[in-house]
Amino acid sequence: MKFSNKVAGLAAGSMMALAATAASAAEGYGECKLYGKQGTEQITPAVPGQFTAIINLPAVGEFNGDTPETVTSGREFCMAVNIAYRLGLDKVVLKNASFDSIVAGQNKDFDIALALISVTEPRKKVVDFSTPYSFGSYGLAAKAGSNVTEDNVRDAKFGTQAGTTMVSWAQDTLKVNNLSVFDDTGAMFTAVAAGNVDVVMTELSIVLGQVAASNGKLEVVGQYEIGGETAGIYPKGSSSKSVIDKIIADMQEDGTLKDLEAQYLAPAWGGKTPADVPTWKF
């Protein structure tokens, strides 16, 4: 689960774009533009006749919608759509799951999980990772007008999400003194808006999106540039891995992924980019 300051200078690549099919997210391609050629690759999907993606909501900018059925746009959603398109599958089905269950390999009957997932060695023991598609930073959000700073953040009431690499990072690297761990993204941001914690940390992309959607209740106070790779997850031993990996690599090469970032992340961030966020030392 990571994102990069490189996103600040995104520019759409030159590529062929076809009009998206008008359909619900669960049954078609939503509002996504389609790139490249249809049906150039083939897999045996986990569920016949459809491309099934596990996701973790809320994820403003990545999957725009409150439920899987209402998602029609977003960077990672349209990434899944374009994978399905190149596989010749015209039905994309989203299934919401806890982040914990995704990285523990507990879900079944899916083709890929997309949830800004950090690649780690322990996770490789239970799941297979896709070709990485972004790199990133941990972002920090606090209630607007709060006095959370680089100097006092370790003593603040600190929150992050269960199952993420940020739990151990906050404890072992940042060495915060008062850590709360939340089951999901929504609960974590509700807690900081209510003042139950002083600051929360998750992927910078998610922080920027949630703050922009808070109507001024929250602000982005800083980021930690930790590097690392973000990738999708396959069920362990998936026979589709090599094919989908090739599609992701092709989309990186032909500019599709950069175009999706430009379309969906910058607007979701309310005009703020990663380059606008102060970088804190750790």
Image (cartoon, rainbow, N blue to C red):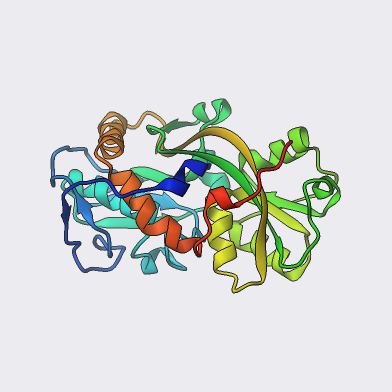
Q: Quadrant of residue 41?
A: top left
At x 37%, y 67%, the residue is 69
Return the x and y of residue 44 as percentages of the image width and height. 22, 39
Asked whether 121 or 230 is in front, the reply is 230
Is residue 253 visible to us here? yes
At x 26%, y 32%, the residue is 246
Is residue 62 visible to us here? no
Return the x and y of residue 199 as percentages of the image width and height. 74, 56
Name the quadrant of the C terminus: top right
In the displayed structure, 31 sits above or below 9; it is below
Q: Quadrant of residue 233?
A: top left
Asked whether 190 or 224 is in front, the reply is 224
- Image-based side of 169 in relation to 90, left or right: right
Return the x and y of residue 35 as percentages of the image width and height. 20, 49
Return the x and y of residue 154 as percentages of the image width and height. 82, 45
At x 25%, y 49%, the residue is 82
Asked whether 205 or 237 is in front, the reply is 205
- Image-based side of 277 in relation to 11, left or right: right
